[in-house]
């Protein structure tokens, strides 16, 4: 990365313009370069954004106490044994059970938790001394990559002659060998 590089930040689904010095060296999905004559203006805008957001962040740990509602003064570590779950009807039936349970678990969420998941916070993203932006970047990554990976697993199970060794190899491809934009552009002859 260098000043003037323009790249796609896939997890956040955003386009990034590098305007200053950086010490990051990870491969990025660079697809453009800022014109030299536009660099002074880009650097001025970038510094302004930085000064009004990241430069003023105060990282701090906020303590919290969590309790069960009611007369409980302790949290039980014992869990009742689960009844064995038997799913008849394939993965769509299992998906329906999962979605029903997820909706049930999330239905009683307080409004402030729902707002946080939506990214609605009074101080705004990246300001106000909160750590939510980091969490939101992770959340957006999981929202974009998670469904893609899970969908691939589901479609792989429907391949007619699927075997366990093939499934293991496909799982390795999905999880350990993620999509590389550079290789993709090279395959298209665009590099």
Image (cartoon, rainbow, N blue to C red):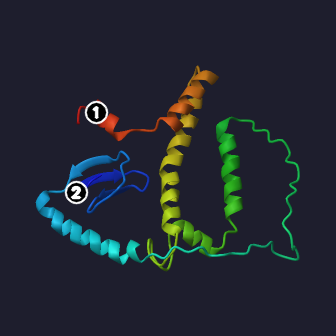
Q: Position of residue 182 (x, y in %)?
A: 32, 38
The image shows residue 12, relative to residue 188, as above or below, that is below
Q: Which residue is mark 1?
A: 186
Q: Is residue 4 above or below residue 68?
A: above
Quadrant of the rendered structure where residue 188 is?
Answer: top left
Residue at 28%, 75% in the rendered image: 48
- Mark 2 lies on a secondary structure that is loop
Label whose residue precedes the other's in the sequence (2 or 1): 2
- Foreground residue among 111 and 139: 139
**What x and y, as percent, mark residue 31?**
26, 47
Left or right, 114 with reference to 120 = right
Secondary structure, mark 1, is: helix
State the quadrant of the C terminus: top left
In the rendered structure, the answer to whether residue 140 lies left or right of residue 27 reads right
Can residue 110 be seen in this snapshot?
yes
Residue at image coords 36%, 45%: 27
Among the 4 quarters of the image, the one containing residue 95: top right
Q: In front: 5, or 85?
A: 5
Residue under pointer 2: 4
Tell me residue 101's x, y (percent): 71, 54
Q: Residue furthest left?
A: 37
Q: Position of residue 51 (x, y in %)?
A: 33, 76
């Amino acid at each position: 990365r260098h000043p003037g590089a323009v790249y796609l930040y896939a997890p956040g689904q955003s386009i990034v313009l590098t305007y200053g010095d950086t010490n990051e060296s990870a491969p990025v999905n660079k697809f453009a370069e800022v014109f030299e004559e536009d660099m002074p203006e880009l650097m001025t805008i970038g510094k302004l954004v930085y000064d009004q957001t990241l430069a003023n962040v105060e990282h701090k740990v906020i303590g919290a106490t969590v309790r069960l509602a009611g007369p409980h003064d302790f949290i039980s570590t014992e869990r009742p044994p689960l009844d064995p779950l038997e799913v008849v009807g394939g993965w769509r039936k299992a998906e329906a059970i999962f979605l029903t349970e997820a909706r049930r678990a999330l239905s009683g969420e307080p409004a402030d938790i729902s707002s946080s998941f939506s990214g609605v916070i009074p101080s705004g993203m990246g300001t106000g001394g909160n750590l939510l932006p980091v969490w939101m970047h992770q959340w957006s990554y999981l929202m974009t990559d998670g469904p893609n990976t899970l969908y691939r697993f589901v479609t792989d199970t429907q391949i007619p002659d699927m075997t366990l060794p093939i499934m293991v190899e496909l799982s390795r491809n999905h999880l350990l060998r993620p999509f590389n934009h550079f290789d993709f552009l090279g395959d298209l002859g665009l590099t």
